[in-house]
Image (tube, rainbow, N blue to C red):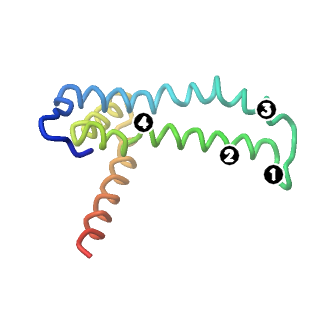
Amino acid sequence: MAKKKKGEKGPGIAESFVGGLLFTMLLVVVVPVVCEIIIQPRVEELVGDTTFMWFSSSLIVTGIMLLALLIFTLLLGGGAILRRFGIVGIIALIVAYWLLGNPQGAIMPVAVLIVLYVFKVVRGKK
């Protein structure tokens, strides 16, 4: 989480939980729909049926879509939830996946956060 200045209040427990829940729902439900319905057709229209060097148009579209999903993940994913809402937001991430009927989906974001935390602690000791 970002360091707070003296006298500055962060989000409360309820706000953190709702924020983590909302960010996860946006990332898992809304972002794929927006990418598929809005972004991908426009990218396909812009790229057309061209080939650049040895890259086909479908490979170029896939690369651009991967970049768009990466940006959304950085803005709404587990790391962003942890920075903005703390551990309560991560608990909400797990609950959101459970509400969506896919509790196993929370394993990867939480595992990545744990691995990054361990690396940060180990690197900080050196």
Q: Quadrant of residue 97?
A: top left
The type of residue carrying mark 2 is: Gly
Q: Residue at x 53, y 43 (%)?
A: 70
Query: Between tags 3 and 2, which lies in front?
Result: 3
Dot 2: element = helix
Q: Nearer the viewer, residue 76 or 111?
A: 76
Q: Identify the residue under disc 4.
A: 76
Q: Pick the residue in front: 91 or 71.
A: 71
At x 30%, y 70%, the residue is: 123
Instruction: Tell me how many marks there are.
Output: 4
Q: Where residue 45 sits in the image (x, y, percent)?
A: 79, 29
Q: Label 4 to label 1, Cα distance in Å?
A: 30 Å
Q: Is residue 34 toward the left or the right of residue 122 in the image?
A: right
Image quarter of the N terminus = top left
Mark 1 = which residue?
55
* 8 shown above or below 53: above
4 or 1: tag closer to the N-terminus: 1
Percent position of residue 121, x then y = 25, 65
Image quarter of the C terminus: bottom left
Pointer 3 with pointer 1, Cβ within 8 A: no
Q: Circle 3 — which element?
A: helix
Disc number for residue 46: 3
Calculate the distance from the C-alpha at mark 3 to the C-alpha at mark 1.
15 Å
